[in-house]
Amino acid sequence: MAAVGIVATLTIQSGKEAEFEEVFKGLREQVLANEPGCEMYDVYKSKADASKYVIMERYKDDAALKAHGESDHFKAAGPKLGAVLGGAPVLDYLDQVA
Amino acid sequence: MAAVGIVATLTIQSGKEAEFEEVFKGLREQVLANEPGCEMYDVYKSKADASKYVIMERYKDDAALKAHGESDHFKAAGPKLGAVLGGAPVLDYLDQVA
């Protein structure tokens, strides 16, 4: 199975959660509409920590993951996300086993 | 959206990776066959750390997550996983936002 995944853990500034969710929902729509190699781009909020969000991502292969990072919509979201992030995102790059 | 997620991060003892993958693939098959409320139970291996695995899980609601933890197949996998784990699993409990 050549699919790859990312778990991205994001910390958001207090009071900026709604703004973050709005930006990321828009990004998700663009990713799913424009990246045929992206099979999942789901946004979750921690039950334990209101400032913590987790993005579960799956791509059909490494090339699709690379295309995601180079896409115009992803690059355009960078400044909007930077304005609400409370720290550097933590990214786990993964190969799907099953 | 009432769906809930878990990101489970597992550290496996060196040399036990194949045994872990076999046990977890079997558990995944039982989960997907017997838990209608489990919508994803996917197994990933870290690209950066050969001892690290990440399970991405999604359930239709909290009741389905509870049913997972109480299932016979999940309980039966416990001792087999305990034999290959290198430390306590780290679990992030999540609510899906998008």
Image: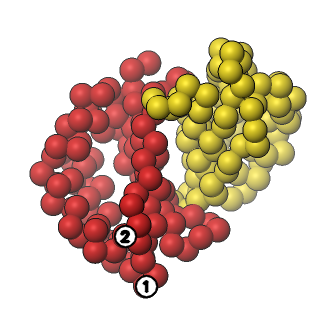
Chain colours: A red, B yellow
Residue type for callout 1: Gly
Most foreground residue, B13 or B31: B13
Query: Percent x, y for residue B39?
Result: 57, 42
Instruction: Specify the quadrant of the image occupied by residue A85.
Output: bottom left
Chain letter, disc 1 residue: A
Q: CA distance from mark 1 to mark 2?
A: 11 Å
Q: Position of residue A66 (x, y in %)?
A: 23, 35
- The first of marks 1 and 2 along the sequence is 1
In the image, taking residue A5 as reference, residue B46 lies left or right, namely: right
Q: Which residue is found at the position 63% from the left and 54% from the top? A: B92
Q: Residues within 10 Å of mark 1 (few under 14, many from 20)?
A: few
Report the residue marked by disc 1.
Answer: A15
Q: Secondary structure at mark 1?
A: loop
Mark 2: which secondary structure? loop
The residue sitting at the left extreme is A72
Q: Is residue B90 above or below residue B24?
A: below
Identify the residue shown where x is 42% and y is 37%. A93
The residue positioned 66% from the left and 37% from the top of the image is B10
- Inspect this view and state whether residue A57 appears: yes
Query: Residue B59 at x, y = what percent?
Result: 61, 49
Q: Amino acid at mark 2?
A: Leu
| A26 shown above or below B70 | below
Residue A23: x %, y % from top left: 28, 68
> In the rendered image, which quarter contains the C terminus of chain B?
bottom left
Direction from residue B5 to residue B66 in the image, left or right: right
- Which residue, given by chain and number where applicable, does mark 2 sit on? A85
